[in-house]
Image (cartoon, rainbow, N blue to C red):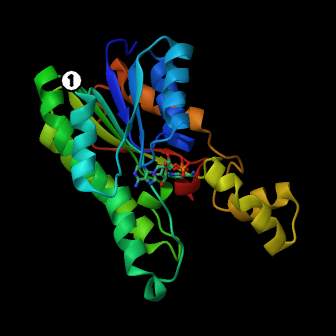
Amino acid sequence: QLKGKTAIVTGSNSGIGLGVARELARAGADVVLNSFTDRDEDHALAARLAKEFDVRARYIKADMSDGDECRALIAAAGNCDILVNNAGIQHVAPVDEFPAAKWNAIIAINLSSAFHTTAAALPMMRAAGWGRIVNIASAHGLTASPYKSAYIAAKHGVVGLSKTVALETAGQGITCNAICPGYVLTALVEAQIPDQMKVHNMDRDTVIREVMLQRQPSKQFATVEEIGGTTVFLCSKAAAQITGTTISVDGGWTAL
Ligand code: NAD
């Protein structure tokens, strides 16, 4: 279905990014994995993907907190039909105590990186007459919670950037959308469960249902495969006129 297309997924050596890269590879796309490290295991991930799905796969190191490195990632890939802006970090603190360095890092990695990669990729997509940009925003791109000011500002920004890029590329065979996941069970989220069990003196299932998934009416985590499948859908023919919008994969969170 996506044979011959090259997909670049930022922040894809774990979690949602890796899940999205796997589903794109399953659909036949060649994939470029990325993070800021350059370990043997990063390159081994790409080799495993290539073998499992019979596609070409590479790992390219680039730090998404640095605009020049974001643009260099696209240049090094040499080709970009599908761009998935996924790299992201979180920090939790009241706004008046929020460390400025954390604010700057979150805005850079979660928001500005998507500006830089998009700017670098658009000329390639326009030359090809086809392109798909999928930004991994969040339910927190549409709603807020206390103590996550930088993350929520960045994710709302990603939704706004997606709409603007959609308007600038409309009618050019290029679409740009944002996926807004609710809670997804990644290693990052899994690691919070034991602490929450201690703090609330609850068993694992109760912590998941009552604390972590308090705002997710389905009381089920979304999976990385579901975020990947939604990305593949946005790259499909059926989605050619879907642009400048958000797709929530949040078990009903934003319907509340
Ligand atoms: P994760 O920590 O598993 O993945 C984050 C990825 O970004 C990792 O591959 C990491 O190496 C990479 N990364 C971090 N800093 C980077 C940098 N400076 N340069 C390049 N890569 C960098 O977390 P995840 O849950 O898979 O999150 C992925 C995205 O999904 C994030 O944008 C996050 O905000 C979003 N999201 C996650 C959830 C959830 O519940 N897990 C919900 C909504 C949105």
Q: Residue at x 11, y 24 (%)?
A: 127
Residue at image position (46%, 17%) is: 27
Task: Classify the position of the N terminus by image quarter.
Answer: top left
Residue at the farthest bottom position = 96
Residue 160 visible to the viewer: no
**In the drawing, does residue 92 fall left or right of residue 61?**
right
Label total for image: 1
Q: Is residue 147 visible?
A: yes
> Circle 1 sits in a helix, a strand or a loop, which is it?
loop
In depth, the one of 208 and 15 nearer the eye is 15
Asked whether, in this view, residue 243 is left or right of residue 204, the answer is: left
Image quadrant assignment for residue 119:
top left
- Which residue occupies 63% across, 47% down? 186
Quadrant position of the C terminus in the picture: bottom right
Residue 150 in the image, given as x and y percentages of width and height: 41, 70
Please state which of residues 18 and 34 is positioned toward the viewer in this rendering: 34
The image shows residue 228 at horizontal and vertical percentages of: 50, 32
Task: Name the residue carrying label 1.
Answer: 130
Crowding around mark 1 (Cα neighbors within 10 Å: few <14, some 14 to 19, many 20+) is some
Q: In the picture provided, is 160 more to the left or to the right than 45?
A: left
Q: Quadrant of residue 214?
A: bottom right
Give above or below for 211 relative to 251.
below
Measured as percent of width and height from the top left, residue 131 is found at 24, 28
Q: Residue furthest front?
A: 40
User: Which residue is located at x 82 percent, y 66 percent?
Assistant: 197
Q: Nearer the viewer, residue 75 or 189?
A: 75
Disc 1 residue lies near ligand 1 with CB under 8 A: no
Of the residues shown, which amino acid type is indicated by label 1? Trp
